[in-house]
Amino acid sequence: MKLSQSNIKKLRQKVEHEGGFQIALAPMQPATFIEVKDASDRLYRDLLEAGFSVLLDDRGQKPNNMFEVIAFLGIRHRLVISGRSLSAGVVEYKDLQTDFFEKIPLENIVSYMQNRTHID
């Protein structure tokens, strides 16, 4: 679900009746950095196709605002995509239950998330 296209009723339905989201994507400044927007959209599609329930915060908010929404919704796995991380070829992963943090090569994200969430 893209956050910009949702409303509180849709979010409530997803969280209360459908088990919420497994992964949150938080693109940093997608309006400024087209490569961030493109990579976020591509990763969002790839994760959905792999069977994940994904929330893409595509509103262009500041990081703290995005992170607060993700925490409020109780989403465990957060992926941050920024111009800096893309330049390095990675995405920043954080497990919000354990505070485990790791930089993952962009091309390995889907398989990495399958291993982290035990989806085959």
Image (cartoon, rainbow, N blue to C red):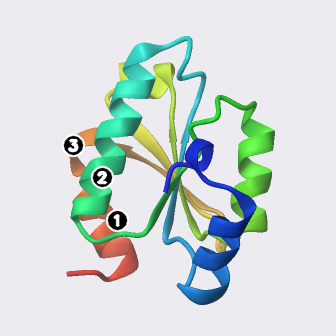
- Can residue 90 be seen in the rendering of this structure? no
The amino acid type of the residue labelled 1 equals: Met
| CB under 8 Å between discs 2 and 3 | yes
Look at the numbered disc 1 and give the secondary structure of its residue: helix
Say if 87 sits above or below 42 in the image: above
Tell me what residue is drawn at x 26 percent, y 58 percent.
Answer: 110
Disc 1 target residue:
113
Using residue 38 as the reference point, say whether residue 99 is left or right of it. Answer: right
The amino acid type of the residue labelled 3 equals: Glu
Q: Between marks 2 and 1, how big is the CA–CA gap?
A: 6 Å
| CB under 8 Å between discs 2 and 1 | yes
Using residue 82 as the reference point, say whether residue 71 is left or right of it. Answer: right
Disc 3 target residue:
107
Using a 10 Å C-alpha cutoff, classify the residue at mark 3 as few (fewer than 14 neighbours), some (14 to 19) or many (20 or more).
Answer: few
Tell me what residue is drawn at x 35 percent, y 26 percent.
Answer: 38
Check residue 109 in the rendering and tell me which mark sits there, or answer none. 2
The percent position of residue 42, horizontal first and vertical second, equals: 29, 39
Quarter of the image where one finds residue 15: bottom right
Using a 10 Å C-alpha cutoff, classify the residue at mark 2 as few (fewer than 14 neighbours), some (14 to 19) or many (20 or more).
Answer: many
Look at the numbered disc 3 and give the secondary structure of its residue: helix
**Front residue (pair 86, 26):** 26
**Front residue (pair 99, 109):** 109
Q: Between marks 1 and 3, how big is the CA–CA gap?
A: 12 Å
Quarter of the image where one finds residue 118: bottom left
Tell me what residue is drawn at x 36 percent, y 37 percent.
Answer: 41
Look at the numbered disc 2 and give the secondary structure of its residue: helix
The amino acid type of the residue labelled 2 equals: Ile
- Can residue 51 be seen in the rendering of this structure? yes
Using residue 73 as the reference point, say whether residue 87 is left or right of it. Answer: left
